[in-house]
Amino acid sequence: MHLLRVAYALDGDDSCIADARHHAAAFLDKARDDQHLPVSARARDLTQLVVSELVTNTRKYAPGPVLLELRVTARTVEISVWDSDPKVPAARAADPSRIGQHGLEIVKAVAEDFEVQREPVGKRITARIALTDGPGHF
């Protein structure tokens, strides 16, 4: 069950990446303040990182609009980014000498869950981040 949900249509310029990060931080602040959910600093930082990486990828590889949807449950924040490109992204093999193109690897490493769904137009990528720090998280 989603306790709070919001969606944003992001414009096509590169400033939408920073806007998306700000929307994500404000959304988690609202979840903490209005829904009294425990939102760790780590969850806030990771959510902004994932939003930034996913929106940056849509700006690089998909023409047209970007839709960002944020949903929170009692345990996680779900980040969904829709774009018009139907091509499903794939994380590349680890290569410490490669500069850039690590975004999807990063998202998969920090997310509790990650999925890509083809839509009638384009695709939707969803990542889930735990709201609280569990064992092994600093």
Image (cartoon, rainbow, N blue to C red):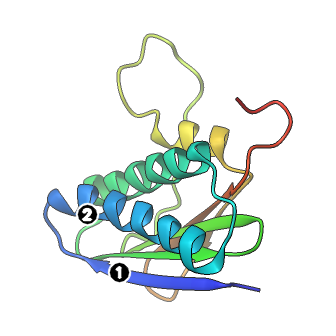
Question: Residue 71 location in percent, x, y?
Answer: 59, 77
Q: Position of residue 100 (x, y in %)?
A: 36, 28
What residue does disc 2 label? 19
Residue drawn at point x = 66 percent, y = 73 percent: 36
Please rate how many residues cluster around mark 1, counting C-alpha atoms within 10 Å: few if below 14, some from 14 to 19, many from 20. Answer: some
Nearer-the-camera pick, 57 or 89? 57
Q: Amino acid at mark 2?
A: Asp
Direction from residue 135 to residue 92 in the image, left or right: left
Residue 24 picture quarter: bottom left
Distance between the alpha carbons at the discs numbered 2 and 1: 10 Å
Q: Which residue in the structure is indicated by mark 1?
A: 8
Say what amino acid the circle numbered 1 marks.
Tyr
Q: Is residue 68 left or right of residue 94?
A: left
Give the SS element for disc 2: helix
Residue 43, position as x, y percentages in the image: 60, 50
Badges 2 and 1: C-beta atoms under 8 Å apart? yes
